[in-house]
């Protein structure tokens, strides 16, 4: 039923790629992707996140940016008494500020 917890440990390698390209002296295009995929016993899980954004260097240590991001996660259990599937996904635009010090 609801409220049950399952704790399992398994190796969970994260694969990722970050790319930043200077479009001009003040503009940068950044792209990022991350994936974690695990399988332990009878439980499979996955988490992935992707984003792309333009960032404008307004000041020496202050940038403003806008972009798009997507996040997705799921878990699939075949364990007796806790079998089931759950998934969550969101995606959409984002606006952000970066401060460096």
Image (cartoon, rainbow, N blue to C red):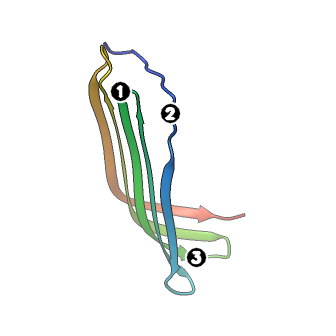
Mark 2 or mark 3, whichever is nearer to me: 2
Q: Which residue is mark 3?
A: 57
Mark sitting on residue 88: none
Q: Residues within 10 Å of mark 3 (few under 14, many from 20)?
A: some
Residue 29 on image: x %, y %:
47, 75
- Assess disc 1: are there few (<14), some (14-19) or many (≥20) residues with their C-alpha within 10 Å of its C-alpha: few
The quadrant of the rendering that contains the N terminus is top left
Could you give the CA–CA distance between mark 1 and mark 3, rounded to whole angstroms? 48 Å
Looking at the image, the residue that sits furthest to the bottom is 24
The quarter of the rendered structure image containing the C terminus is bottom right
Q: Which residue is mark 2?
A: 10
Of mark 2 and mark 3, the one earlier in the sequence is: 2
What residue appears at the point 52 percent right and 87 percent down from the top-left corner?
24
Q: Nearer the viewer, mark 1 or mark 3?
A: 1
* Mark 3: secondary structure: strand
| Residue depicted at x 58% and y 63% | 98
Image check: 17 left or right of 76? right
* Horizontal arrangement in the rendering, residue 87 relative to residue 99 (left or right): left
Instruction: Give the image location of residue 10, x and y in percent.
Output: 50, 33
- Secondary element type, mark 2: loop
Residue at horizontal 52%, vertical 73%?
20
Q: Mark 1 = which residue?
A: 42
């Amino acid at each position: 039923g609801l409220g049950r917890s399952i704790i399992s440990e398994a190796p969970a390698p994260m694969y990722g790629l970050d790319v930043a390209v200077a479009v001009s002296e003040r503009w940068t295009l950044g792209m990022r992707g991350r994936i974690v995929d695990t399988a332990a016993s009878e439980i499979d899980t996955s988490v992935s996140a992707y984003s792309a954004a333009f960032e404008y260097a307004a000041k020496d240590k202050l940038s403003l940016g806008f972009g798009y991001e997507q996040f997705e996660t799921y878990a699939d259990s075949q364990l007796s008494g806790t079998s089931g599937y759950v998934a969550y996904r969101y995606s959409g635009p984002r606006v952000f500020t970066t401060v460096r010090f």
